Every structure is written in C-alpha cells, then in structure tokens.
Image (tube, rainbow, N blue to C red):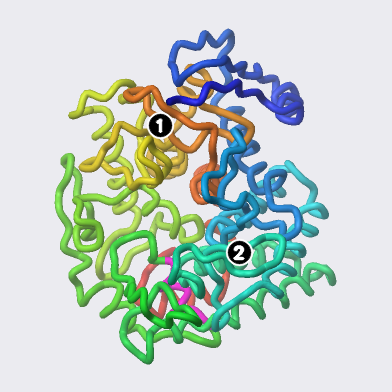
C-alpha cells in the first residue's frame, strides 16, 4: 500500500531557489504520478544546484547530532521497522564527508561550520569501536558502540571502512596545511588512516582481502572479496596504506582472480569490459558498482592491464539506460526520462535491481550518480523528477526508489544512495572530489604499485 504524503521544500531551499531565480516546485498529495503541471521550467544548472543542496542536507541537517555522522537511513514517515534511527553508517559517512566538501565549496555552509563538523566526526571516530583499526558497518551514534549489521557482522567491515577512509583522505586533501587548526585535524585524520590494518584482512597472509572480521566469530563470515564489484577502492587503499599495506599479489590473485576479471561479455550491444558474472551471476551489476569506488578514484583516464575504467563505467550506465528505453518487460514509466537501477528499497524490501533482475523499480541515485558517464541522459532524469514527478522529491532530494508499475514509493532515504548524488554531480561539473582524492600521495603510490596508469 503506497504511503500518501505531502512533500514540500524547506524554507532554506525556497530561499536558495529565489536567490537563483528559480521557480520552487510544488508537490501534491497522492501516489507516484507523472501528471504534475509545472508552471515554469527550471534551468539545468539551477536544478543541479538544487539537487546537490538537498542531498547535501541529508549529511548536514540530517546527521546524527552527537557524532555528526550519517544516519544509515532517514524515513520521513518516521516508521523504522526493526531499526534504530540513530544508527550511523561508516560507508555512508564516507560518502557524506565528500558531500560536505562539496557543500562547503559551493557555499551551502561556511568553511568554519564545515570544519567544526569534520572535527566532530573525527572525534567520534577516535573514540568509537574499531577492530584492528577497521570500523564496523554500523554504530550507535549516541555511544560509539558497534551495532551488529547481522549476527556475525559485529566487527570490522573493510569495505565500508574503505569508503570512510576515502572520505577522510578527501577531507584531508581539502584542508589547509598553513592553518594551525586545520593542520591539527590533518594529523588526526592521518592517525585514523594509518591505524587501519588492511594486512590483517588477508587472514594470515592469503592473497585476497576478506570483508569481515569479528572479535566474537573471527573469520566465520568467510567473505573473500574478488572482483568485479563495488570494492576496487578497498584494494587500492590496501596497496596504498603507509603502515599496513598488502602486496601486489593480493590485487592480482585475489581481486583480479589471475585475470578472470578481464573476461567480459556484450550486453545490450555494449562490452561490459570486466567480468560481472563471477561475482554477480548476471551480465551486469547494479549501478552502484559504477559509483562507490569512483567517488574519489577518477576513472576518466584510469586503466590497468585488465581494463579501461572509463569505458567500463560509461558502458555500465548506458546498458542500464538502454534496458529502460527498450523496456522489455513493458513496465509503466520506463523510458528516456525515467531510468536507472541499483540496490535500493523496493516493494519487497531492500533489493538489488539490474536489467536481468528487474522488479519494475527505478532508483533515482542510479541515473543521477551517473552524471559523469551519461550527462544528457542523467539531466533528463533530473528534469523529469523535479518538473513532472515532484511527488517523488522531498526534503533531502529524490526519494530512494519508486515504481509506477506497482504504484509504489516510500518517503525514505538511504545514506549510501543519497551520498553519491552530490559528489558525482560535482565531479561532472568541476572534478573537485576526483582532484582532491587523486592528489593524495598514498593514492598515487597505491595505483602505481598495482600497475594503473592515469593522468
């Protein structure tokens, strides 16, 4: 049963719209629809500013107040089935740190305000539960104590921690070494980064990284991370660590599976470049694979002996677009203006959406976080959401997912879906986060060590 709600723009957003000469979108009560009559057309540039501002606010105004960290989810209907709304997320907070940099640079908040938030987050991380320097997936934001993601997932989560570390390194590169206060924060971030024991997660020296370790269950989850999926950033950072680095063999034998990663296929007339089947049992993965590692890693000229990472991600996004345009399942609403699938909420709970496993659910982050790869197609999706289907947009930007086919949506957000939107849009507009992250000397060392080329 669809939740009938009324969405509205906050006064702060309205002021932003007025300052930009934009017409504030009104929203109406009812189910997901495409029939809203927009009186004026908002410019593409202003729409980009607006969606960046709103999604940034998820991590600013919507943050858990004690820690400053990103809440795992925010439900505007205030319904949290079996979930504490004060649970904060490591990976989502990493994306949020990058979003905060975008917000400061765009003037959504002052640098002084942003610095205070960075200090609060770093202070929380210094005291919160860690496991061999690696953070858990979730904490209680009010106490810093681990909140198990599942029964045995109550310890270090190296993938989510890598997303967080990428955010911290981006902040570090943004800070001013000539300012005493910012220099002190740089030192504190370096300590957190250097404490991460990537080598511990090789499980006594195996040539692969393991996702989880628990003080109560050890390696029982037994999840060795092999590509291709969203985890490239973990292997780059593991090679880059100044204190607990792993060898090149961990990347080539573990992640790349002795070259099996390069066995691509053709889907919707496009090469997948790398092998999605081995980790996904599917020709192509959900679109977050093209986002999470590449919020910081600049794929535009990134290559190694296995693939061209720009073509990989561009084709990945275009495969999803072509699927929605061709619409083989004849789902209502799919087309040139409404496309994109990733892991998100659905009528059946959290689900992984992709062309060969399509429930009729569109996830806005899929298209909006693909702006660098599909700028024309992504702007059409953005215009559609704000000018034709604005009941699907709320305080923190587009809601997580919707289905016209099933007449379904919920006024709910997830940190890992909202975070990539302002960051990847900024990378398309200015390249800011790519420039900052790629400027880190350790990142360059890690990429060089693994045989990557980049400009």
Write down the residue under mark 2: 139
Q: 8 and 242: which one is in front? A: 8
- Image point 61% across, 23% down: which residue? 7
The quarter holding residue 95 reads bottom right
Q: Is residue 439 visible?
A: no
Does 35 sit above or below residue 177?
above
| Numbered disc 1: secondary structure | helix
Q: Which residues are magenta?
A: 233-241
First reached walking from the N terminus: tag 1 or tag 2: 2
Q: 95 and 432: which one is in front? A: 95
The quadrant of the picture occupied by the C terminus is bottom left
Q: Residues within 10 Å of mark 2 (few under 14, many from 20)?
A: many
Residue 410 horizontal side relative to residue 115, left or right:
left
Percent coordinates x, y for residue 418 in the rendering: 54, 44
Residue 317 horizontal side relative to residue 107, left or right:
left
Specify the farthest residue to the front.
82
Dot label at residue 376: 1
| Numbered disc 2: secondary structure | strand
Dot label at residue 268: none
- Image point 80% across, 70% down: which residue? 178
Percent coordinates x, y for residue 5 in the rendering: 57, 22
Secondary structure mainly formed by the magenta segment: helix
Does 6 sit above or below residue 424?
above
Residue 150 horizontal side relative to residue 243, left or right:
left
The quarter holding residue 219 reads bottom left
What is the spatial separation of the Cα atoms under label 1 and label 2, in whole angstroms?
39 Å
- Image point 59% across, 61% down: which residue? 436
């Amino acid at each position: 049963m669809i939740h009938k709600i009324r969405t509205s723009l906050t006064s702060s957003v309205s002021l932003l719209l007025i300052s930009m000469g934009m017409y504030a979108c009104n929203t109406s009560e009812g189910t997901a629809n495409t029939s809203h009559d927009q009186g004026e057309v908002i410019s593409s540039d202003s729409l980009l500013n607006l969606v960046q501002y709103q999604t940034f606010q998820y991590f600013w105004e919507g943050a858990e107040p004690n820690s400053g960290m990103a809440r795992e989810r925010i439900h505007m209907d205030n319904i949290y089935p079996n979930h504490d709304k004060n649970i904060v997320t490591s990976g989502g907070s990493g994306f949020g740190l990058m979003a905060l940099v975008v917000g400061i640079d765009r003037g959504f908040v002052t640098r002084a305000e942003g610095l205070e938030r960075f200090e609060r987050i770093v202070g929380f991380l210094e005291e919160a539960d860690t496991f061999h320097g690696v953070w858990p997936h979730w904490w209680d934001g009010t106490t810093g104590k681990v909140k198990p993601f599942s029964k045995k997932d109550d310890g270090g989560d190296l993938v989510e921690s890598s997303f967080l570390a990428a955010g911290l390194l981006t902040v570090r590169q943004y800070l001013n070494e000539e300012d005493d206060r910012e220099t002190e924060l740089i030192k504190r971030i370096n300590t957190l980064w250097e404490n991460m024991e990537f080598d511990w997660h090789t499980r006594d020296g195996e040539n692969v990284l393991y996702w989880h370790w628990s003080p109560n269950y050890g390696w029982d989850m037994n999840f060795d991370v092999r590509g291709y999926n969203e985890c490239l950033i973990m292997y780059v950072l593991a090679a880059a660590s100044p204190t607990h680095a792993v060898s090149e063999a961990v990347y080539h034998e573990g992640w790349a599976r002795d070259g099996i990663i390069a066995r691509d296929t053709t889907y919707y007339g496009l090469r997948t470049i790398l092998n999605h089947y081995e980790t996904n049992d599917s020709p192509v993965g959900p679109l977050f694979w093209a986002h999470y590692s590449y919020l910081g890693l600049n794929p535009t000229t990134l290559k190694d002996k296995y693939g061209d990472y720009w073509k990989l991600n561009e084709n990945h996004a275009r495969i999803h677009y072509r699927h929605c345009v061709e619409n083989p399942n004849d789902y209502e609403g799919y087309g040139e203006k409404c496309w994109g699938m990733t892991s998100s909420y659905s009528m059946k709970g959290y689900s992984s959406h992709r062309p060969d496993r399509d429930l009729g659910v569109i996830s806005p982050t899929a298209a909006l976080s693909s702006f660098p790869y599909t700028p024309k197609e992504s702007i059409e999706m953005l215009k559609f959401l704000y000018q034709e289907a604005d009941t699907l947009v709320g305080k923190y930007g587009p809601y997580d997912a919707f289905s016209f086919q099933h007449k379904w949506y919920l006024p709910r957000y997830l940190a890992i879906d909202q975070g990539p939107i302002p960051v990847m849009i900024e990378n398309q507009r200015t390249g800011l986060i790519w420039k900052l992250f790629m400027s880190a000397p350790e990142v360059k060392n890690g990429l060089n060590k693994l045989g990557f080329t980049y400009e």
